[in-house]
């Protein structure tokens, strides 16, 4: 049976269909989850997609964080459920304190959409184990508030513990501290990434196929954890 | 529905300054000034009812300030058999405005229908919210371009943003899911200080709204020319996809069906010229009642889109119409007129942002993100449940009523707290507006302009000069790289963008399985059209047609946005007539129909009109998007060929 | 150090989608009883020398507020958040 | 009607690109002598009944400010811009 990956739709989610497509192309079953439904329906992993949840008013992700599904998801993530937050999803994970730091207004103050080179800095996460360490990839970036900030101590700690997952190369599109494009939690099961891997999964519509690696990685991760004795299995964790 | 202010306004429009008119003599004003709380303000005597209008035939009304001619006002009195109430006067002035009635352009636009080649692809054409074209047996595409020029000069960000919002609702009203936007833009000189205000604001507004809706921007134009200094052009196109079986229409059919207003609350947005009805006194209160800029909320629009689509798919709608520039007035009259029914509306049920709004203000409000739905009573609960799921307000405000036994049409009766404030035949508002054959005359300077030929310009004589010319050209604002603009737009969202900037045409995949898609391009050249509007329009069509063809599409349908100066200027009217004739002839020659479009008049600063600027959009069918043709050289050693003369 | 504060708000008749989104979110956080929320900008200006109200007003008018849709208010603040 | 005002500012150590953009634009407008500009949010909350400072503080803490990057201040205002 193929893995079941949930994709959450909040009011104002936009890239949920794309994330579901990427999940399918990676060979898993995409399960649509609704923000108001606290039940994770037994999925093995979750993607929080890009978009403008609640219009991105106030701060991006600030309101979505309180959705019923997020309460359940937070507990499950702490229990090891793999969670990938893309763009708005990354912002929500930070607002929900599942990842440290915050995403602030791009320093040039504009929304920016371009094809962006990244370097994968850590392959020790549920979503990057399929990449080579140091691998350079090209995927779209598109955001207005993608400038990652955290205090120096947090940044040093992220670096020291290998939790900087990807960095911008050939130009930082938003002013992120230390060119950070993606980070992970301590356990490596929760990853937030500002650029959009789900937009680089088909030659016809994306700048590359590099994004697919994030979605196949989690399947490898799930296959690995599934082999572990019961109880270590992240799936099925619920609140 | 269109989204320009309902009353034609010379630039800069009066929206900023508030009504710049003399105080109309004897309009009765609410004693409380209309600003007290609703409860206190509810004195029946405050409202100009039908009964009161019948009893006060001599009361003078500010129809001229509302843009109505003497004879137009007389006709309204004839139709009603009495003087109109304030609310009726507001409604007629809106619906009979140039913008809604097409009174100056109608006689010319007919050619699009008359000269159109037969097409079995067209499922809905001119007269509908947007044209609909069949792509496969199961799928259809709808597309349309509209202007939001004047509001974008006043408040560039919101003007442009609500322009996108407006055209997207047109597409939605046809039953389609909007899947992309495009934005042909014209600004004044790139180095003019006011361009530094307008240009970034417009681009941010288009991006802000489109990005937040999750619609990829797949193309557009950015042109700088001093003729647009006081009157930029902000045109927006949207394209949507629908199963053929989901095609919607706007007719308010079915006596007893419920009229639902869905979406944002109604506020004093963009009330425009109608505010003169409330401006007899310029005290502090009326100061606050100035017509206000329309502010868009793309988040609500996104929810509106999702709930409408869910409602369509569940088969719950009888008729639907978006609310745009003429707000409820247009939606109520057009839906009833289209069905030949009557309608009874209780206006106080409309959810308001400001409790003190009066009937004519509610009817004229241009508040964004609203749709009008006609629903069978048995399906009402299901509709309300879907709206609730998405967190969108949906309110029953009225009911469809019988047509008169004698006439084919019914009456639109609008009450305000139990009193009748409107009682009129909807068709008289929606369809029977005045039509003018305006005088036309070739501009007297045209011969001189045409005589000033490019051959007289100095030519680069040396390689160095040639180099310099080339560098100057590619560095010029009109030819330079446009990524400062396009990077502010999301072109990836929805995952079906096959070609976008900097390609000649946008290409999107419509169906993931079969790979069928569409190509679309928008083009216009005001300088050509200024020299020769007939051929200028044809050239715009030809360019757009070529752009679609080189991307791999087979052109099948045309939309257009005709941006011109004042129709009351015979020179402008001549330009307009020539451009329409050129476009209609061009379409006939190429064998593709015009399926819809938009006319924007009064684009001028003082008495100086912009260059006539017909913008033409061509839609092409791409059988398999895998075979699309990107521009640029493919690989080393490829042969380069030049086709044509 | 004293600074000038400029508060910029949308005019009352102008739609405030941001405030509305926040107001609508409150019940879901279990907070009732809020009638309305409006959100504007809070700008703190520090001068090299003495506080200059006139200058602050000019900045607000030219740069901070969009007179078509916004009103502003200028005041002097003894100490503030950003200190 | 009285209302509660919540002013939210980026913490001083967090870069404020918007404020900086305004500060950088001033000399071009012929305005000198400004040391710094910082831009935050000004939130006006109206209650159905009496002003409730405690509730306002809760809203600010839970929703209006992100403690990782922002500070806030709550105050009661007799009348304001949004009136
Ligand atoms: N330049 C044009 N070419 C073709 N059709 C046009 C043109 N301008 C307007 N129309 C058509 O006239 C009808 C009325 O236009 P408009 O007022 O923009 O739409 P609505 O009916 O939604 O208010 C629409 O069907 C539109 O497609």
Image: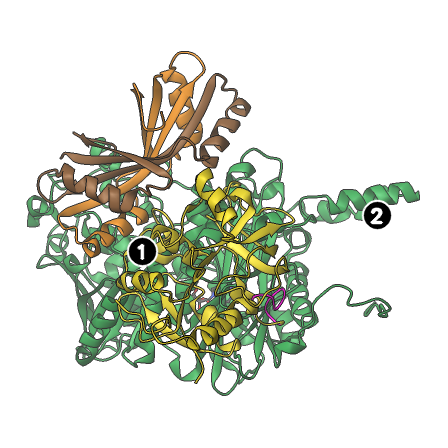
Chain colours: A yellow, B green, C orange, D brown
Asked which quadrant contains residue B243, the reply is bottom left
Q: Position of residue B467 (x, y in %)?
A: 86, 44
Badge 2 local density, few (<14 within 10 Å), some, or many (20+)?
few
Q: Secondary structure at mark 2?
A: helix
Name the side, left or right, on which B317 lies relative to B400: right
What whole-number distance in Å separates the C-alpha atoms at marks 1 and 2?
66 Å
In the rendered image, is residue B332 in sight? yes
Task: Assign ligand 1 to one image quadrant.
Answer: bottom left
Residue reaching furthest to the front: A229
Disc count in the image? Answer: 2
Quadrant containing the C terminus of chain A is bottom left
Q: Residue, x 33% and y 25% (percent of image)? A: C5
Residue at horizontal 39 percent and vertical 61 percent from the top: B101
| Residue toward you, B474 or B159 | B474
Q: Chain of mark 2?
A: B
At which x and y percent is residue B117? Answer: 58, 80
Please report, as a chain letter, where disc 1 is located. A
Task: Decide if residue B436 is on the left or right side of residue B392.
Answer: right
Left or right: B108 in relation to A225 = right
Neighbours of disc 1 within 10 Å: few (<14), some (14-19), many (20+)? many
Residue A80 rendering spot, x and y as whole percentages: 37, 65
Whether the residues at callouts 1 and 2 have beta carbons within 8 Å, the answer is: no
Residue A30, position as x, y percentages in the image: 42, 76
Task: Write the residue at 69% across / 71% down.
Answer: B629
Residue found at the far right of this picture: B462
| Location of mark 2 (residue) | B455
Q: Is residue B550 above or below residue A117?
A: below
Question: What residue lies at 40% left-to-right and 48% top-to-bottom?
Answer: A100
According to the picture, the residue beneath numbered tag 1 turns out to be: A65
Question: In front: B74, or B109?
Answer: B109
Query: Magenta stretch?
Result: A204-211
Is A157 situated above or below A3? above
């Amino acid at each position: 049976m193929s893995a079941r990956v949930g994709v959450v739709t909040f009011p104002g989610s936009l890239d949920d269909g794309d994330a579901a497509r990427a999940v399918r192309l990676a060979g898993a079953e995409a399960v649509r989850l609704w923000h108001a439904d606290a039940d994770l329906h037994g999925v093995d992993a979750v993607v929080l997609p890009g978009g403008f949840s609640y219009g991105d008013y106030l701060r991006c992700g600030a309101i979505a964080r309180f959705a019923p599904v997020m309460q359940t998801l937070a507990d499950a993530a702490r229990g090891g459920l793999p969670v990938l937050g893309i763009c708005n999803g990354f912002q929500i994970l930070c607002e929900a304190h599942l990842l440290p730091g915050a995403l602030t207004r791009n320093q040039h103050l504009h929304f920016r959409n371009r094809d962006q080179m990244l370097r994968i800095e850590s392959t020790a996460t549920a979503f990057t184990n399929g990449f080579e360490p140091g691998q350079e990839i090209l995927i779209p970036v598109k955001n207005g508030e993608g400038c990652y900030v955290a205090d120096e101590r947090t940044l040093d700690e992220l670096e020291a513990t290998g939790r900087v997952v990807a960095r911008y190369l050939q130009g930082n599109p938003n002013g992120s501290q230390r060119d950070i494009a993606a980070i992970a939690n301590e356990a490596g099961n929760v990853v937030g990434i500002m650029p959009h891997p789900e937009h680089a999964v088909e030659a016809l519509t994306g700048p590359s196929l590099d994004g697919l690696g994030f979605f196949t990685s989690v399947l490898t991760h799930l296959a690995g954890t599934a082999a572990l004795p019961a109880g270590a299995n992240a799936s099925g964790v619920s609140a | 529905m269109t989204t320009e202010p309902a009353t034609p306004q010379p630039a800069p429009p009066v929206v900023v300054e508030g009504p710049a008119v003399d105080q109309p003599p004897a309009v009765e004003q609410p004693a409380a000034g209309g600003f007290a709380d609703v409860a206190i303000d509810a004195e029946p005597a405050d409202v100009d009812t039908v009964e009161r209008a019948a009893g006060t035939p001599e009361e003078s009304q500010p129809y001229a300030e509302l843009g109505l001619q003497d004879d137009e006002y007389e006709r309204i009195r004839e139709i009603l058999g009495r003087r109109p109430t304030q609310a009726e006067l507001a409604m007629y002035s809106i619906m009979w405005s140039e913008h809604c009635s097409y009174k100056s352009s109608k006689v010319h636009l007919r050619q699009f229908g008359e000269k159109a080649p037969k097409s079995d692809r067209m499922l809905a054409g001119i007269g509908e919210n947007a044209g609909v074209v069949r792509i496969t047996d199961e799928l259809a595409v709808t597309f349309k371009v509209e202007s939001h020029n004047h509001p974008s000069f006043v408040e560039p960000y919101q003007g442009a943003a609500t322009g996108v919002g407006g055209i997207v609702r047109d597409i939605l009203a046809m039953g389609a899911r909007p899947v992309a936007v495009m934005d042909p833009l014209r600004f004044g000189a790139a180095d003019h200080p006011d361009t530094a205000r307008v240009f970034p604001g417009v681009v941010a507004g288009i991006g802000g709204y489109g990005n937040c809706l999750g619609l990829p921007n797949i193309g557009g134009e950015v042109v700088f020319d001093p003729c647009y200094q006081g009157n930029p052009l902000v045109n927006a196109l949207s394209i949507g996809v629908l199963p053929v079986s989901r095609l919607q229409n706007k007719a308010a059919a079915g006596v007893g069906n419920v009229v639902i207003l869905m979406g944002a609350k109604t506020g004093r947005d963009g009330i425009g010229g109608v505010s003169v009805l409330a401006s007899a006194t310029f005290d502090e209160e009326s100061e606050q009642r100035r017509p206000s800029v329309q502010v868009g909320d793309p988040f609500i629009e996104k929810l509106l889109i999702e709930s409408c689509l869910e409602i369509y798919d569940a088969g719950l709608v009888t008729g639907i119409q978006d609310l745009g520039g003429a707000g409820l007035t247009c939606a109520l009259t057009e839906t009833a007129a289209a069905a030949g029914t009557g309608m009874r509306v209780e206006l106080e049920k409309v959810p308001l942002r400001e409790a003190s709004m009066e009937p004519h203000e509610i009817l004229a409000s241009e508040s964004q993100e609203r749709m009008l739905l006609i629903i069978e009573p048995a399906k009402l609960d299901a509709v309300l449940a879907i709206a609730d799921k998405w967190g969108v307000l949906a309110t029953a405000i009225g009911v469809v009523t019988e047509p008169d036994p004698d006439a084919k049409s019914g009456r639109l009766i609008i009450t305000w707290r139990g009193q009748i404030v409107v009682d009129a035949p909807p068709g008289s508002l929606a369809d029977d507006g005045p039509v003018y054959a305006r005088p036309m005359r070739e501009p007297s300077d045209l011969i001189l302009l045409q005589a000033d030929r490019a051959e007289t310009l100095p030519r680069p004589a040396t390689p160095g000069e040639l180099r310099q010319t080339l560098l100057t050209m590619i560095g010029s604002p009109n030819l330079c790289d446009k990524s400062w603009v396009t990077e502010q737009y999301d072109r990836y969202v929805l995952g079906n963008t096959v070609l976008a900037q900097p390609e000649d045409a946008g290409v999107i995949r419509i169906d993931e399985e079969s790979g069928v898609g569409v190509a679309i391009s928008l083009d216009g050249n005001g300088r050509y059209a200024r020299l020769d509007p007939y051929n200028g329009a044809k050239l715009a069509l030809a360019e757009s047609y070529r752009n679609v063809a080189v991307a791999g599409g087979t052109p099948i349908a045309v939309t257009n946005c005709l941006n011109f100066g004042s129709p009351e200027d015979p020179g402008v009217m001549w330009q307009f007539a020539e451009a329409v004739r050129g476009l209609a002839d061009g379409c006939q020659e190429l064998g593709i129909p015009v399926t819809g479009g938009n006319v924007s008049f009064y684009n001028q600063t003082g008495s100086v009109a912009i260059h006539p600027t017909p913008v033409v959009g061509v839609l092409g069918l791409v059988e398999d998007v895998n075979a699309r043709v990107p521009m640029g050289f493919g690989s080393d050693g490829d042969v380069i060929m030049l086709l044509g003369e | 150090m004293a600074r000038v504060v400029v508060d910029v708000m949308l005019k009352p008749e102008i739609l405030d989608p941001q405030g509305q989104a926040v107001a609508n979110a409150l019940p879901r956080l279990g907070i009732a009883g809020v009638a309305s929320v409006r959100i504007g900008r809070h700008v703190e200006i520090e001068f090299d020398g003495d506080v200059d109200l006139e200058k602050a007003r000019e900045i607000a008018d030219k740069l901070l507020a969009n007179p078509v849709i916004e009103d502003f208010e200028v005041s002097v603040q003894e100490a503030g958040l950003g200190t």
